[in-house]
Image: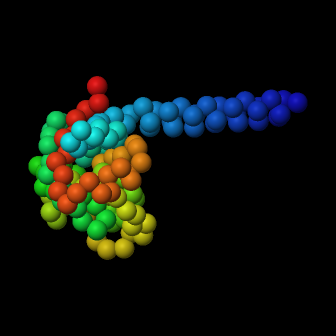
Amino acid sequence: MKRLFLFSAAALMSICFVINCTAQSFKDNVKITLTIGNKIVPAILYNTPPAKNLMGKLPVTVSLNRGPVDYCGGIEPVVYSEKDLQAGYHRGDLAYWIPGQDFVIFTENKKDASGSPDLVILGKVSSDIKELRDLGSTINVTITLDR
């Protein structure tokens, strides 16, 4: 009986720990808005040093050009470290592309991580990315904190 009680208590504590960590990670993300013309797109920035560096630059307006898998355009450099780099991305990711010093909104997936790691993932669009796929060849995006 003691073993069953101890096992149950340990399992309950583990579940509470996982729930608390998950809630904390969501809580630490920062809500932002991407304003494109009269369209307001909700997004989040992750709780990472590069995303916090970008937050310090907000509000900012960026002119983005349509590519085959994204919208991207020049932005003031984001500070990052080697551990922040990756090669792959997912639809809806917000990133900093190092070679072009570009802010990027990915509209398509690249699940594999082939190629050189030249991306810093900063956050993610919170709504359906389909809203952004066909807005034109050049868009102006104002990134602001969601207050």
Q: In the figure, is residue 36 to the left or right of 88? A: left
Residue 5: which quarter of the image? top right
Q: Residue at x 24, y 65 (%)?
A: 67
Q: In the figure, is residue 100 to the left or right of 127? A: left
Given residues 49 and 74, the one toward you in this image is 74
Query: Where 97 falls versus 43 (above or below)?
Result: below
Q: Give the x, y percent position of residue 45.
A: 32, 41
Q: Residue at x 28, y 71 (%)?
A: 116
Given residues 109 and 11, the one toward you in this image is 109
Q: In the figure, is residue 49 to the left or right of 79? A: right
Q: Quadrant of the N terminus?
A: top right
Q: What count of labels does the image hold?
A: 0
Task: Identify the coloring.
Answer: rainbow
Q: Residue at x 28, y 61 (%)?
A: 70
Query: Where 136 falls versus 20 (above or below)?
Result: below
Q: Give the x, y percent position of residue 18.
A: 57, 37
Q: In the figure, is residue 85 to the left or right of 139? A: right
